[in-house]
Image (cartoon, helix red, strand yellow):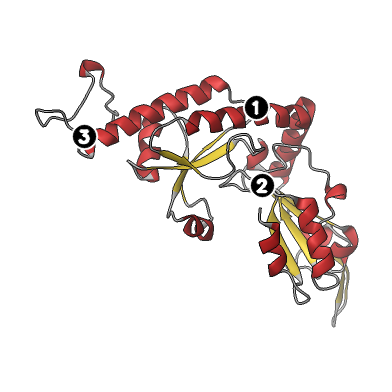
């Protein structure tokens, strides 16, 4: 994270700052303390900070009181919970100063013919029937992660992240995006390959039982800045192992060899190089 460049973007007219806690592409763990300090000192008085914690809350201890931001958002399905639910944490006084964005049951205080008053947060933002089943599922997921221990999860994932980063570094034709080896990062690596488009790579790895994500990961401006249109991403969680990483690397190397053979690497007889009957051929 380039703090100097960030500081140049913040000025007296800045009223709202949104920033990721952890990058879902680069795996970078952003220096939130320094970011908050810059905003509080350089931005307009009362400027608000929203922290996208979707990639941090499931993987590490996040102390909302200590971070010093105004809002924190996270999603349920990234932390072993159901889809279609997440949460927004906010400073109570800030939430109560905000008008509701939707009307319905349970969000009002008093209703008159010419005006209404609203219930305190969070009820004022939860009009109508809530996602009851999803909320119960998310609560169970939070209890599950808490029982394991977020510090344990974080420490284990740091070990996996470093192992994945080192293994990918040794794969010929692969460029890993994000912090270099030895830098603390989330347990994910986005990468590009010389021989194959990320979407094709994802399809072939899927056939071999390895799931990755391919695309721009909802970060097109970042990819443009890096000089790529898309990338592939391998993501790990506490249920993964180093053996999973080893299997991913093996299948990745085999797939890249297959695509390299299609690109024109031929033997002296003009045939594509292979290793005989055991040559890797993806099954469709």
The residue closer to the viewer here, 244 or 32, is 32
Q: Residue at 72% across / 32% down in the picture?
A: 154
Residue 264 visible to the viewer: yes
Q: Residue 62 lies in what quarter of the image?
A: top right
**Disc 3/disc 1 C-alpha distance (Å):** 37 Å
Camera-near label (1 vs 2) is: 1
Residue placed farthest to the bottom in the image? 114
Q: Is residue 274 above or below residue 90?
A: above
Return the x and y of residue 207 as percentages of the image width and height.
37, 30
- Tell me, yes or no, whether the two marked residues, 1 and 2, touch with CB atoms within 8 Å: no
Residue behind mark 3: 265
In the depicted structure, whether residue 14 falls above or below residue 114: above
Q: Position of residue 30 (x, y in %)?
A: 70, 49
Residue at left offset 45%, top offset 56%: 227
Element type at marker 3? loop
Q: Which residue is mark 2?
A: 22
Please report the residue visible at 75 percent of the width from the left and 73 percent of the height from the top: 11
Residue 173 screen position, x and y as percent? 38, 37
Of residues 43 and 239, the one nearer the viewer is 43
Position of 16 compared to 28: left or right? right
* Residue bearing mark 1: 159
Q: Give the Cα distance between marks 1 and 2.
A: 17 Å
Nearest-to-viewer mark from 3 and 1: 3
Residue at the top extreme of this rendering: 277
Q: Real-space Cα distance between discs 3 and 2? A: 40 Å
Determine which of the numbered discs, if any, sits on residue 178 in the image: none
First-in-chain label (3 vs 2): 2
Q: Quadrant of residue 276?
A: top left
Instruction: Give coordinates of residue 20: x percent, y percent.
Output: 67, 53
Q: Which badge, 3 or 1, comes first in the chain's sequence? A: 1
Q: Secondary structure at mark 1?
A: helix
């Amino acid at each position: 994270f380039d703090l100097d460049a960030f500081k140049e973007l913040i000025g007296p007219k800045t009223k709202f700052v949104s920033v990721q806690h952890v990058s879902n592409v680069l795996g970078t763990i952003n220096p939130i303390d320094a970011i908050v300090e810059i905003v509080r000192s350089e931005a307009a008085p009362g400027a608000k900070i929203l922290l996208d914690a979707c990639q941090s809350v499931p993987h590490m201890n996040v102390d909302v009181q200590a971070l010093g931001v105004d809002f924190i958002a996270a999603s349920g399905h990234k932390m072993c919970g159901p889809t279609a639910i997440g949460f927004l944490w906010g400073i109570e006084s800030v939430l109560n100063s905000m008008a509701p964005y939707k009307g319905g049951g349970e969000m009002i205080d008093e209703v008159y013919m010419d005006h209404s008053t609203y219930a305190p947060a969070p009820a004022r933002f939860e009009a109508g029937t809530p996602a009851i089943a999803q909320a119960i599922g998310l609560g169970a997921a939070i209890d599950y992660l808490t029982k394991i221990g977020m510090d344990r999860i974080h420490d284990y994932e740091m070990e996996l992240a470093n192992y994945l980063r080192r293994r990918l570094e040794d794969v010929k034709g692969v460029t890993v995006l994000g912090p270099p080896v030895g830098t603390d990062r989330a347990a994910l690596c986005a990468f590009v390959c010389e021989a194959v488009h990320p979407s094709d790579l994802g399809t072939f790895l899927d056939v071999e039982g390895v799931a990755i994500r391919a695309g721009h990961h909802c970060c097109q401006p970042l990819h443009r800045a890096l000089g790529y249109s898309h990338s592939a991403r391998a993501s790990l969680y506490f249920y993964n192992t180093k053996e999973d990483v080893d299997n991913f690397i093996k299948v990745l190397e085999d797939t890249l060899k297959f695509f390299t053979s299609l690109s024109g690497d031929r033997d002296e007889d003009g045939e594509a190089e292979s290793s005989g009957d055991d040559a890797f051929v993806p099954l469709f």
